[in-house]
Image: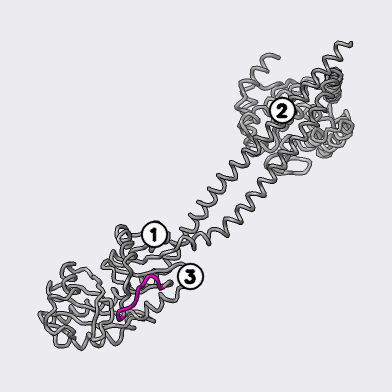
């Protein structure tokens, strides 16, 4: 006994020591994991937030570029409409009227689009001469002319200076179908540059609109982009011009670069392959935008980390407690196991006793019902064979319906068993009918037949009373329906209530088929039995009138089993 106690104490001390080591190891491992998660989580949050800001920058750039994109489209549409009308003048050789037409179109630009903000002048080189001339009669050196001729009928745009003030305009030009004439449209940039200048970008961001020749149309935001103005031209600083070289290589994108020694992120977007919107953020500004979101995410993340740390500490303390509980449980495990085995044995014994008693009660109930039904049948000179035969037929037919999946809402395995018991009581109401009427050899009078029909109503009352103590509500309902309605006809000409079709409960419809069939093939003192062939023919002819046609079809399908049963009797 002393040796056992010593061993138990040694085992307990070893467990405590092992649990302490495991707790310290778990704590250090948790701290290492938390530090790693914090570091990598911070890196992940930074890149995720920066990616979000880049998406926001691209969206901002698209919003800025949208008005100029509409401006270009509107200018091209106006040029296309006037070019089409100008073709008509050329083909009708009325070029002398074309100049007035172009002047009129220059004045009424709003006719092309409601609320149009376009301002400009139409002119061109038509059939070898300038119309609505700005260049005299020599245009061969004009950029817009050469570019339009080289485009083979496609509309092109150029930036050029016009007038004495040499202010900057956008010129859209298009070669006409005669292969010589070129129509041009100078569009003023004042309104579109004013629209673009309304965008607010903050103190450390700016945007510039340039073409491939690095001619700046306008700038938005920080004036550091432009070294100054020459007329209407923005002069870009050299370091910005160098950055534009990377912009011209792609249609759109994002990249990081240095401008005047400052780290910047550049967003750019190309329109019609010629014009570039360039949005520049100082990375300090971008980091400022990121920082607020980063701080919030890190606070949330740290809250999760602290929760996990508390969980681990709590887990460590619980491990110590659980160790003590485990030792106590181990000491009592043998007692618990013995008690559990004892309980399981008791449960098995009681279950077997209940099972046997239940089986005996069910068997007793079936025997009582069958013997009672046999006694009733014997009163009208029938043997007990009729109730046993109809029970077998009813079970056969129910099993076949179940196998075929018919009447799924009603037929299950319990239904089949209960149908056999309920069928035994189908004529139990005859116990209240006089022997004189039951055993009369001649045909019943109308008054006698009315009394005989009452056996269905009596049967329902008696079946309900006999089975009331069983507590099986489904068996009671089926037995009552079988007794009360087994003489109903599918066409509504039966008794006692004249029910039609599916109004007749399914158990009663099944009973009607098997009751008539057994009566046909059974030999009675007042009639000869029919052979199976004749009996099946009579059942088949009754489909839809006397019997449910679905049940008749199924009954005929089990004819081999029924004939086999008839031969075995």
Give SS at disc 1: strand
Q: CA distance from mark 3 to mark 2?
A: 58 Å
Please state which of residues 56 and 490 is positioned toward the viewer in this rendering. 56
Q: Earlier in the sequence, mark 1 or mark 2?
A: 2
Q: Is residue 34 magenta?
A: no
Q: CA distance from mark 1 to mark 3?
A: 18 Å
Please state which of residues 552 and 107 is positioned toward the viewer in this rendering. 107
Image coordinates for residue 237, horizontal then vertical, percent:
33, 69
Please state which of residues 93 and 158 is positioned toward the viewer in this rendering. 158
Image coordinates for residue 118, horizontal then vertical, percent:
33, 81
Magenta segment, which residues?
Answer: 223-231
Residue located beneath label 3 in the image: 203
Give SS at disc 2: helix
Cβ atoms at labels 3 and 2 below 8 Å apart: no
Q: CA distance from mark 1 to mark 2?
A: 55 Å
Identity of the residue drawn at 28% across and 73% down: 76
Label 1 crowd bin: few (<14), some (14–19), many (20+), radius 10 Å: some
Left or right: 246, with 360 as reference point: left
Residue located beneath label 2 in the image: 21
| Residue 258 tag number | 1
Please identify the quarter of the rendering in which residue 222 is found.
bottom left
Please identify the quarter of the rendering in which residue 240 is found.
bottom left
Kindly report which numbered mark, 1 or 3, lies closer to the viewer in this rendering.
Answer: 1
């Amino acid at each position: 006994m002393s040796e056992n106690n010593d061993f138990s104490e040694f085992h307990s001390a070893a467990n405590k020591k092992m649990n302490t080591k495991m707790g310290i190891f778990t704590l250090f491992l948790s701290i290492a994991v938390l530090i790693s998660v914090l570091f990598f989580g911070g890196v992940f949050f930074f890149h995720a937030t920066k990616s979000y800001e880049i998406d926001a920058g691209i969206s901002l750039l698209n919003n800025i570029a949208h008005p100029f994109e509409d401006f270009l489209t509107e200018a091209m549409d106006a040029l296309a409409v006037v070019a089409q009308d100008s073709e008509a003048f050329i083909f009708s050789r009325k070029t002398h009227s074309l100049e007035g037409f172009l002047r009129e179109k220059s004045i009424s630009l709003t006719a092309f689009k409601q609320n149009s903000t376009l301002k400009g002048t139409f002119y061109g080189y038509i059939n070898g001469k300038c119309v609505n001339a700005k260049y005299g009669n020599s245009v061969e050196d004009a950029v817009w002319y050469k570019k339009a001729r080289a485009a083979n009928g496609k509309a092109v745009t150029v930036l050029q200076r016009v007038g004495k003030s040499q202010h900057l305009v956008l010129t859209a030009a298009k070669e006409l179908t005669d292969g010589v004439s070129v129509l041009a449209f100078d569009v003023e940039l004042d309104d579109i540059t004013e629209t673009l200048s309304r965008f607010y970008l903050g103190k450390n961001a700016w945007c510039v609109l340039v073409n491939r020749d690095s001619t700046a149309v306008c700038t938005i935001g920080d004036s550091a982009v432009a070294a100054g103005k020459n007329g209407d031209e923005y002069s870009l600083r050299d370091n910005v011009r160098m950055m534009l070289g990377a912009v011209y290589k792609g249609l759109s994108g994002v990249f990081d670069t240095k401008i005047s020694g400052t780290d910047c992120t550049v967003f750019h977007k190309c329109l019609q392959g010629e014009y570039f919107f360039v949005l520049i953020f100082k990375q300090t500004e971008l980091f400022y935008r990121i920082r607020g979101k980063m701080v919030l995410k890190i606070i949330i993340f740290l809250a999760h980390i602290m929760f996990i740390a508390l969980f681990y500490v709590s887990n460590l303390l619980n491990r110590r407690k659980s160790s003590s509980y485990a030792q106590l449980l181990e000491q009592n495990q043998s007692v618990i196991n013995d008690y559990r085995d004892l309980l399981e044995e008791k449960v098995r014994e009681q279950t077997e006793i209940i099972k046997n008693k239940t089986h005996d009660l069910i068997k007793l109930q079936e025997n009582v019902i069958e013997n009672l039904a046999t006694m009733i049948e014997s009163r009208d000179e029938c043997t007990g064979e009729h109730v046993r035969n109809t029970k077998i037929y009813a079970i056969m037919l129910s099993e076949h319906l179940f196998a075929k999946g018919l009447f799924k809402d009603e037929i299950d395995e319990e239904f089949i068993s209960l149908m056999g018991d309920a069928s035994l009581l189908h004529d139990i109401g005859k116990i209240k009918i006089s022997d004189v009427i039951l055993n009369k050899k001649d045909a019943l009078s109308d008054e006698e037949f009315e009394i005989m029909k009452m056996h269905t109503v009596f049967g329902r009352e008696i079946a309900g009373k006999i089975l009331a103590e069983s507590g099986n509500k489904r068996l009671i309902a089926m037995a009552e329906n079988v007794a009360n309605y087994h003489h109903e006809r599918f066409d509504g000409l039966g008794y006692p209530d004249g029910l039609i079709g599916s109004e007749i409960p399914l158990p009663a419809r099944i009973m009607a088929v098997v009751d008539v069939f057994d009566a046909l093939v059974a030999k009675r003192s007042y009639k000869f039995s029919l052979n199976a062939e004749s009996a099946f023919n009579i059942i088949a002819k009754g489909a839809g009138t006397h019997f449910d046609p679905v049940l008749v079809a199924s009954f005929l399908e089990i004819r081999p089993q029924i004939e086999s049963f008839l031969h075995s009797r």
